[in-house]
Image (tube, rainbow, N blue to C red):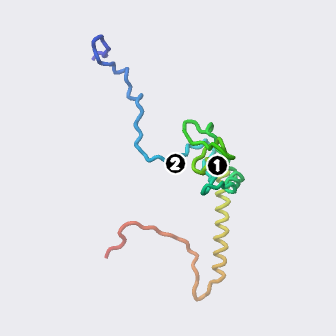
Amino acid sequence: MSEETNTPGSNRTPRNASSRSSKAARKPWTPPQVLETPEAPDGMQYRWVRTHIRGEADKTNVHMRFREGYEPVHPSEVQGYDLPVIDDGNHAGTVGVGGLMLTKIPKETVEERNAYFAQQTDQQMKAVDNDLMRDEHPAMPISKERKTQVSFGRGNKS
């Protein structure tokens, strides 16, 4: 076979002029989200922090989050997204919507925080177990077995 060319008087375009790869695939429709969160850069994690509640500024919450290590995200840090920006107040010029502000925190800090609260939870469980075992009576022993079982299906049919 010979290669097709565009000759005068012909309304055909050569195959090499059009490429299937140049057409972008259509994305399926999804409901819009008010809090669209972009991908965080490597080593960071994004989180929405409450700045207002019922029309009142929630300075305590913002201050606590900043002390934990959260920092506000500026629109220049998030390329390729059209995110809303806070226009006025203490956090003007940062990404925010509806009383929430987008913040970032290093993943190491998140892991340290999670480990701290896991340790707190473990200590509380041990304290509850010790208190419970102290009140145990020999006639009615208390079992510390913590085991859950989830089953699906019909079960036993006789």
Horizontal arrangement in the rendering, residue 112 relative to residue 6 (left or right): right
Quadrant in the picture for the C terminus: bottom left
Q: Residue 139, image x and y in percent?
A: 58, 89
Mark 2 vs mark 1: give the one in front: 2
User: Which residue lies at the image location 57% right of the left edge and 78% below the top edge?
Assistant: 143
User: Which residue lies at the image location 52% right of the left edge and 48% below the top edge?
Assistant: 34
Q: Is residue 24 above or below residue 55?
A: above
* Residue lying at the far top of the rendered structure: 8
Separation of residues labelled 2 and 1 (CA atoms)? 25 Å
Residue located beneath label 2 in the image: 34
Q: Residue 148, image x and y in percent?
A: 50, 70
Answer yes or no: do the residues labelled 2 and 1 have beta carbons within 8 Å?
A: no
Residue 78, by quadrant, is top right
Secondary structure of the residue carrying numbered label 2: loop
Query: 10 Å neighbourhood of mark 2: few (<14), some, or many (≥20)?
Result: few
Residue 22, by quadrant, is top left
Horizontal arrangement in the rendering, residue 80 relative to residue 124 (left or right): left
**Nearer-the-camera pick, 47 or 125:** 47
Secondary structure of the residue carrying numbered label 1: helix
Q: Which amino acid does label 1 sit on?
A: Lys
Q: What residue type is labelled 2?
A: Val
Residue located beneath label 1 in the image: 107
Q: Is residue 66 above or below residue 87?
A: below
* Residue lying at the far right of the rendered structure: 67
Query: 10 Å neighbourhood of mark 1: few (<14), some, or many (≥20)?
Result: some
Q: Residue 3, image x and y in percent?
A: 31, 16
User: Which residue lies at the image location 37% right of the left edge and 23% below the top edge?
Assistant: 18
* Residue lying at the far bottom of the rendered structure: 139
Mark earlier in primary sequence (2, 1) = 2
**Nearer-the-camera pick, 10 or 16:** 10
Residue 153, by quadrant, is bottom left
